[in-house]
Amino acid sequence: METGVVPLAAVDGAFDLQATVESGQTYLWDRADDGMYDQPIAHGGDHWYETVVRPFTPPRDPDAAPLVPEPAVVRVRQVGDADDPDARLEWESNVDAERLLTHLLRLDDDLDAILDDTPDVSLLADAYDRFRGMRLVRDPPFACLVSFICSAQMRVSRIHGMQMRLAESFGDSVAFDGETYHAFPTPEQLAARTESELRDLSLGYRAPYVQRTAELVADGEAHPAAATDREYEAAREYLTQFVGVGNKVADCVLLFSLGFLEAVPLDTWIQTAIGDYFPDCEQGNYTDTSRAIREQFGGAVAGYAQTYVFYYLRTRSE
DNA sequence: TATCCAAGGTAAGTT
DNA sequence: AACTTACCTTGGATA
């Protein structure tokens, strides 16, 4: 086993692991000690989180070496909050995971600079204040694509459960620390399953979407990472060729995997925010409403504001 | 205990 | 091109 420590003093701006991993941007991490999402969100706990990552190349740096040399189990926890000068991330893995963690958790972002670029609007300020240190993520592209195809009309906790079952049922097993983990399935592994087998995992009507999208990727007809070198709206359009992917899911993949920080997924919570706080942004169609709210949320980093607002509104009643 | 409802939308069919 | 409708599943609310 390899282990390491990332001092958070070396990171630009604050960091909050729990908010980052449990805010509904990624469904590929699991809380090690208890069932993630099965209980109300209690911030401040120093939980261990685990994920399994296959070798993949950073979408924005295609000439770089893969982030891990082999399928890797990564276990990480945060010790100390943003105000603690000794705060740190502790990790355990079968490989050197520091570069991988920096990528997945966007530790290379300068969060203070991003906040400086965000408009001074009370809703945004409140959300940033409540979840200070939350960062966006960079999920592996194919797993992110499948996750958000599964997200249609579905609760956060159940989306997470679907991804865990997909890995457990169809992904390669990886031995680590005396236990057996499962990587998220490859496009080939999912393409080889039947709609019925996917429905057995409670994917419902999303099952054929996932199967057919996996086929498109496995057959080489398209790959989500190929959207990266396009202009933002063209990249969104490119992703809608996958089955079960409309503008909203496409925006999620652009934001949570491919590093398009200007993407603002227009989900039900953001639609509510538009109605309650920014009614002038409602333009009657996705493209124009998206442009308007993107402007309102700070343009190039609008996706950061979106994700804070999403999490803020979704957890308001708790 | 039974019934109802809504959950990070999308595809397919109509006008 | 704009507008409707069907779609799986299930935890939690309501009666």
Image: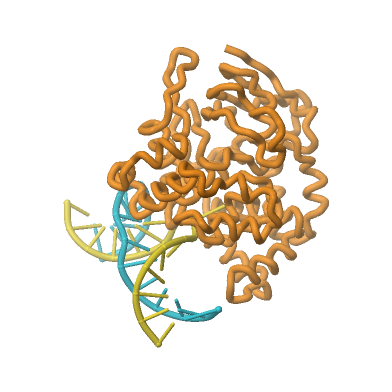
Chain colours: A orange, B yellow, C cyan
Q: Residue at x 46, y 35 (%)?
A: A186
Residue A79: quarter of image:
top right
Expressed as whole percent of the image width and height from the top left, the position of residue A195 reads: 31, 47
Residue A224 at x, y percent in the picture: 57, 47
Give left or right: position of A298 versus B8. Answer: right
Say above or below: A294 vs A188.
below
Relative to A37, is B4 on the left or the right? left
Q: State the quadrant of the N terminus of chain A.
A: top right
Q: Is A279 rendered above or below residue A234?
A: below
A103 w.r.t. A25: above or below: above
Front position in the image: A225 or A152: A225
* Residue B6 percent location from the top left of the image: 42, 62
Quarter residue A152 falls in: bottom left
**Rendered location of residue A179, percent (x, y):** 43, 17
**Residue lying at 78% horizontally and 55% vertically, measured from the top left:** A118
Judge whether residue A181 can be spotted in this image.
yes
The residue located at (39%, 47%) in the rendering is A211
Q: Residue at x 59, y 68 (%)?
A: A286
Between residue A61 and residue A219, name the one nearer to us. A219
In the picture as drawn, the residue positioned furthest to the front comes out as A220
Q: How many marks?
A: 0
Residue A126 visible to the viewer: no
| Vertical relation: C14 (above or below) A47 | below
In the drawing, does residue A104 fall left or right of residue A167? right
